[in-house]
Image: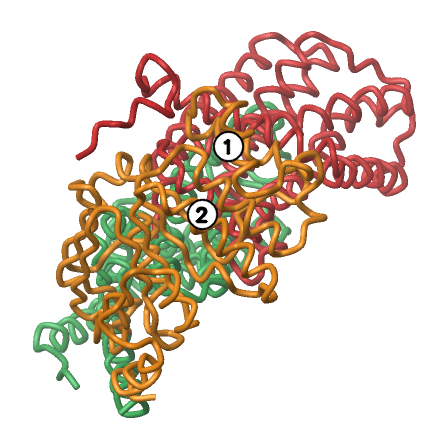
Chain colours: A red, B green, C orange
Amino acid sequence: MPEALATPYAAGGDRPVAGYLRAIAAIVRKDLAAELRSRELLGGMLVFSLLLILIFNFALELDARTRQTVTAGVLWSTFAFAGTLGLNRSMALEVDRGCLDGLLLAPVDRSALFFGKALGNLVFMLLVAAIILPAYSALYNVNLFLPGLIGVVLLGSIGYVVVGTLLSSMAVQARTRDILLPLLLFPVVLPVIIAAVKATSGLLQAAPPEEIRGWINLLIAYDVIFTAVAFMTFDYIVEE
Amino acid sequence: MEPMPRALKALNWLTAALFLGALYMVFLYAPREAVMGDVQRVFYFHVSAGWVGAVAFLVTAIAGGIFLARRETKWDRLAMASVEIGMVFAFINIVSGAIWARPVWNTWWTWDPRLVTATIMELIYLAYLMLRQGIEDPDRRARFGSVYGIVAFISVPITFLSIRFFRTIHPVVIGSGDPTAEGAFDMTPRMLQAFMFSLLTFTFIYVTLLWHRIRLARMTEHVEQRRMQLTSA
Amino acid sequence: MIEVRKLVKTFGRKPVLRGLDFSVPEGDFVAVVGPNGAGKTTLLRILASLARPTLGEVRLAGRRLPAEAGAVRRILGVVSHQPLLYGDLTAEENLRFYGRLYGVSELEARVEQALETVGLRPRRRDLVRTFSRGMQQRLSIGRAILHEPLVMLLDEPHTGLDPQAAAMLDRVLAEVTGEGRTVVMTSHDLQRAASLANRVDVLAGGVMAASVRKGELDPAELPALYRSVTGA
C-alpha cells in the first residue's frame, strides 16, 4: 500500500480529531455561504414565522391579558413549524443533486457529516429566533429580552435540530417528503416543545425557580440523550 | 406453502380458550364496582390493550436494532408485524378509554398522561407506516424503519414524564385530583385476578397474531419471488 | 491496485452482480461497458465505498472494502454523472469546500492547480448554477483530483455532453489520467471507451463477459464482439 498519503494532506499527519472538526466546520461554512447567496431558506422561514404570528394573533385574540400566558406557546409553535421548512430544505440540497455522495466519499466519519448539517441547521434556527423574538417583542409590547430566555431558546433549538436533522435525512429520501417530516418529527420532539414552552412561560411570568429548573433539566436530558442516539444511528441511514 | 405448524395450531386453541376465560372473568367473576358500575369492566381490556400496544412497540424497537446489527430480513419482518398489531391494540386502548370516560366523568377525553402518551404512541405508529410506505428500496425501507422505531421508542417515556410533570403543575378538574391515577378505584382480590388474567390473555392474543402475521409475510414474499421468476423467465 | 473476487450484489431479492471477478493493475485505464442495468454503476459504487457488497471480496490498494473504507476514500477520486457540486457556490468555493473536507494542505495552491488543469480558471468566481453541463463535469473532475488520488472512478462522465464538450472532457481526462493513476471508467459508448482506455471489459449477465486489451482487437470489430457477448 503506497504510503504516499502525506503529501496532499495537512502537515503533521491527519490527526483524526482535527480532521473531524475541520469537516464539521467546512460543512457549516458551506451551508452558510450558500444560504447567504440564495437566502431562500432563511427568507422562507422568516416570512412563514411572521405569517404564523399574524394568524395566531387573530386565532387566539392576543389581547393584553391573554398575551402573557400565551406568548410562549405562540413562539414555540412558530419555531416548530417554521423549523420543518429549514430542515427539509437543508437536507434536500444534499440529496437532490447527489451531493450526499460527495459528502459520503470524504474520508471522515459519518457522524461528522451529521454534526455539520445539524450545526448549520441550528445556526439557521437561531438566526430566525434572533429576528422573530425582537419582532414579537415590538408587535406585542412584551419584554422578551431576559437572559434565561436565550438559554431556553438555545436548549430547545438544539433538541429540535438534532432530532430534526436525523429524521429529515430519512424523510427527504421518501416520496412524500414534505408531509412526512412533520409527521415523524412532532411526536418525537414533543417533550422539547412542552419543556421549552413551560420554561419560557415560567421566565416570562416569574414562576418559582424550581419549576423552571425542572423544565430546563428535562431539556438538557433530552438534548444529551438524542445527540447520543443520533450519533449512533446516523451511519445506518446513509450507508447503503 | 408451509403448513401451519402444530405449535401454532395449539396456540390458536389455547388463546381462544383464554379469551373465553377472560370474558367470563371480566363479566361474571369480577364484582360490580361500587361507584362506576358495570362500565368499569372496560378497564380490564383497556389497560391490557394498552399494555400490548406498548410491548409491541418495544418489540419493534428491539427487532429494528437487531436488524441494523445483523441485516437479516426476518427481524424487519418481525418489526413490521409488531407495528401492525400494536397499532390495533393501541387504538382499542384509546377507544375503550373514551368509552370508560364518558359515563364516569361525562367527557370523551381526559388529558391523563397515560392516555395522551398512548395516543402519541399511536401517532408514531402511523408515522412509522407512512415512512415505510414512502420508500421504494426494500433495504432502505427496513433500515429507516429500524432507526425511526428506535428513536421514537426512546422518546415515548420522556414524553410521558414531561406530560406528567406538566400535569402536576396544572391539575385538571376532570377526574381525580391526583394526576397519576387514572380513575383510581380500589381493586378487590377478584378484580385483581380478573385483571391479571386479562393481561395474560391479551399477551397471548398478541403473540398468536404476531406469529400468524409473520407467516403471512413470509408466504407473501414467496409468492412475489415466484411471480418475479415466472415473469422474467 | 483493484482486486474484485466473486462479487455478488443483490437488491432485495434481485441479483445484479453474480460473482464478478475484476482486476486492475496499477496505472491501468480500464473501461467497463455493458447494456443498461447491467450493473456498471453498481460496481462503481461498490468500488467507491458508497455501497456494500452482498458477498465477495473487494480490495483497493490492498485495503479491504467495506471494512477499511476510511483509508480507501483518501486515495479515491470519483466522478459521477451527477456533478456533486453546489449550484449556489462559485467554482472556487466548491473546490475549497471539498479541499477542506478532505483535509488537503496548501489549499489555495491546489485549488488554483485544479482550476488550471480543467481549464476553468477564468470562470472561478462564477456560480456553478450558471455553468453548462460540460463545464460542471470538468469542475467535477477538478474536485476529484484535488487530493491527488491514486485511483479514479468515473461513472459515464460523458453523459449529456455535446461532441465539443465531450472532446474537451477527453483532453482533460488524458491529462489527468496520464499521471500514473489507476482509472476505471464506465461507459455505454464503445468507441470512446476503446480510444481512451487501454483495456475494455464487458459487463453482462452480472459478470465480466469479455476483456480486450488495446491492440488485441481491431476497434472496428468491437461492436460485433459486444453484441455476441451481451446477446444484443
**Residue assigned mark 2:** A101
Callout 1 crowding tier (Cα within 10 Å): few <14, some 14–19, many ≥20: many
Task: Please tell me whether residue C161 is drawn above or below residue A170 in the rendered image.
Answer: below
Residue C55 sits in quarter: bottom left
Give the percent coordinates (x, y) of residue B57: 35, 51
Give the percent coordinates (x, y) of residue C93: 61, 32
Chain letter, disc 2 residue: A
Q: Which of the two residues, C201 or B157, is positioned nearer the viewer here?
A: C201
Q: How many marks?
A: 2
Amino acid on which the number 2 mark rests in the picture: Asp
Task: Please tell me whether residue A19 is drawn above or below residue B20 in the rendered image.
Answer: above
**Residue assigned mark 1:** A162
Q: Is residue C183 visible?
A: yes
> Which element is circle 1 on?
helix
Give the percent coordinates (x, y) of residue A56: 83, 39
Callout 2 crowding tier (Cα within 10 Å): few <14, some 14–19, many ≥20: some
Residue B5 sits in quarter: bottom left
Residue at figure coordinates x 54%, y 39% from the top left: A164
Q: Which image quadrant: the N terminus of chain B?
A: bottom left
Q: Is residue B94 visible?
A: no
Q: Which of the two residues, B56 or B11, is positioned nearer the viewer here?
A: B56
Q: Which of the two residues, B225 or A229, is positioned nearer the viewer here?
A: B225
Chain letter, disc 1 residue: A
Q: CA distance from mark 2 to mark 1?
A: 21 Å
> Which element is circle 2 on?
helix
Amino acid on which the number 1 mark rests in the picture: Val
Q: Earlier in the sequence, mark 2 or mark 1?
A: 2
Q: Which of the two residues, B223 or B183, is positioned nearer the viewer here?
A: B223
Residue at figure coordinates x 70%, y 20% from the top left: A201
Q: Which image quadrant: the C terminus of chain B?
A: bottom left
Q: Is residue C86 left or right of residue A38?
A: left
Residue at figure coordinates x 38%, y 28% from the top left: A228
